[in-house]
Amino acid sequence: MSVVAIPTRRHPGVRPARPRTGPTLTITLDLAPGPLSPRLARLVQLLGELAESGEGQLRAVRDATLGPHPVPPPDAAEPSADEDHVRILAGSRTVRRGDHVIALTRIEYELLLFLAERPRRVFTRLQLLSSVWGYEHAVARTVDVHVRRLRAKLAGSEVITTVYGVGYRLADAAAISVDHSG
């Protein structure tokens, strides 16, 4: 069962005339085992995109009466000890490549984590400013500077790809994993 809660979005720099609690929309989907129908898959994808844009939250809730949790796919297993593999340890906010710790600034770390958690999606500079920096009032080229610094620190690992005329995304061949337990 999946639950999505979407509160109204407060725009940065705009203060409401009076404080109020925003309405919340909760959508509950009872999903049967097996593949989703194309229409349901599209709905789940759109809800995920809405949540990723910062306009809500997407939370999966598992009911204990449904039985055992699904086994993660084989590609989600422990990454290889490859020297070029980049591993983001979210618990300690560190990034490792092989046995080496890569020193990143807060924004570089947040940018890398944001892209790594959303593979195969292209983000414009304004979307990145809004999602990673938390505001849209900076110059869009600020993103370019941080991407360039991040690429320099991860030299030898193709991690971020430029989609010319659009923005940035995680590279298809990026050897990267996110460990939320460590």
Image: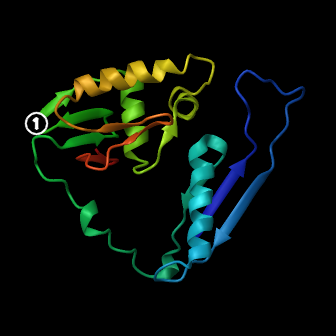
Please state which amino acid type lies under the numbered disc 1.
Asp
For the view shown, which residue lies furthest in the right direction?
A: 17
Q: Residue at x 73, y 39 (%)?
A: 9
Q: How many numbered marks does the figure carry?
A: 1
x, y percentage for residue 125?
Answer: 52, 30
Q: Quadrant of the N terminus?
A: bottom right
Work out whether 113 lies above or below 105: below
Q: Quadrant of residue 126?
A: top right
Left or right placement of residue 82 versus residue 115 in this view? left
Residue that mark 1 sits on: 99
Work out whether 6 lies above or below 125: below
x, y percentage for residue 149?
Answer: 31, 20
Left or right placement of residue 95 versus residue 38 in this view? left
Q: Quadrant of the C terminus?
A: top left
Q: Residue at x 40, y 74 (%)?
A: 69
Left or right placement of residue 52 versus residue 76 in this view? right
Closest to the observer, 17 or 169:
169
Please say which color scheme the image uses: rainbow
For the view shown, which residue lies furthest in the front direction?
A: 165
What is the crowding at mark 1: few (fewer than 14 residues within 10 Å), some, or many (at least 20)?
few
Q: Residue at x 22, y 30 (%)?
A: 154
Q: Residue at x 62, y 58 (%)?
A: 47
x, y percentage for residue 53?
Answer: 60, 43
Closest to the observer, 106 or 166:
166
Work out whether 5 lies above or below 30: above
Q: Is residue 146 visible?
A: yes
Q: Quadrant of residue 75?
A: bottom left
Left or right placement of residue 68 versus residue 3 in this view? left
Q: Is residue 106 visible?
A: no
x, y percentage for residue 132?
Answer: 50, 31
SS for dot 1 = loop
